[in-house]
Amino acid sequence: MAAFDEHASAYDSWFFDNQNLLTSELKLVAHFLDKDSEILSIGCGSGLFESLLAKDYGIHITHGIEPSKDMAEVAEKRGLKVDISPAETCEIEPNKFDIIMFNGSVSYISDLDVCIKKAFDALKTG
């Protein structure tokens, strides 16, 4: 997403300026994730949430999908392996993940039905 390429370096600063929102969103997301799960983050952005979930909650998300190359570069510096691709056209290995997280990204996905089908297929059986 070209719009985020231009603002990748400033993206995190909004969350740091709004620490209460960042903290409450992290608590909410962490509540629903399992530390022992293989988790994919679709629309991982800069990897801010993923890195803070690891640091503050011991939840390690190692793989993300992100359409903005600049945001993906920041996420990779934070330790994520990022596929640079829109969610609608990305290749996700079937039966690989326990959890697939869309943390604020669904409003940016143009064909959510296609993306949800891909995500469902990528979830482990059961």
Image: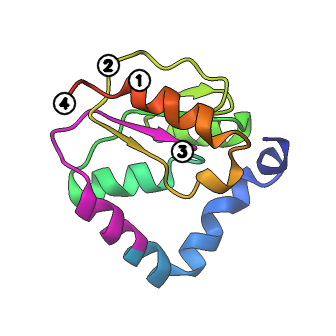
Query: What is the spatial separation of the Cα atoms under label 4 and label 3, in whole angstroms?
Result: 25 Å
**Residue under pointer 4:** 126
Q: Are marks 1 and 2 in contact (CB under 8 Å)?
A: yes
For the residues labelled 4 and 2, the Cα–Cα distance comes to: 10 Å
Classify mark 3: helix, strand or loop: loop
Mark carried by residue 44 = 3
Please name the amino acid that badge 1 sits on: Asp
**Front position in the image: 74 or 84:** 84
Q: Residue at x 18, y 46 (%)?
A: 35
Is the C-beta separation of discs 4 and 3 under 8 Å? no
Stretch of the chain drawn in magenta: 25-43
- Discs 4, 2 touching: Cβ within 8 Å: no
4 or 2: mark nearer the eye: 4
User: Where, by quadrant of the figure, is residue 61 drawn?
Assistant: top left
Q: Give the residue at mark 1.
A: 121
State the image coordinates of residue 122 (x, y, percent, origin top left).
39, 24
- Residue 95's disc is 2
**Residue 13 colored magenta?**
no
In the picture shown, does residue 23 fall above or below 123?
below
**Tag 4 secondary structure:** loop
Q: Secondary structure at mark 1?
A: helix
Mark 2 near mark 3, Cβ–Cβ under 8 Å?
no
- At x 28%, y 61%, the residue is 30
Question: Is residue 1 shown above or below 7?
Answer: above
Q: Quadrant of residue 126?
A: top left
What kind of residue is marked 4?
Answer: Gly
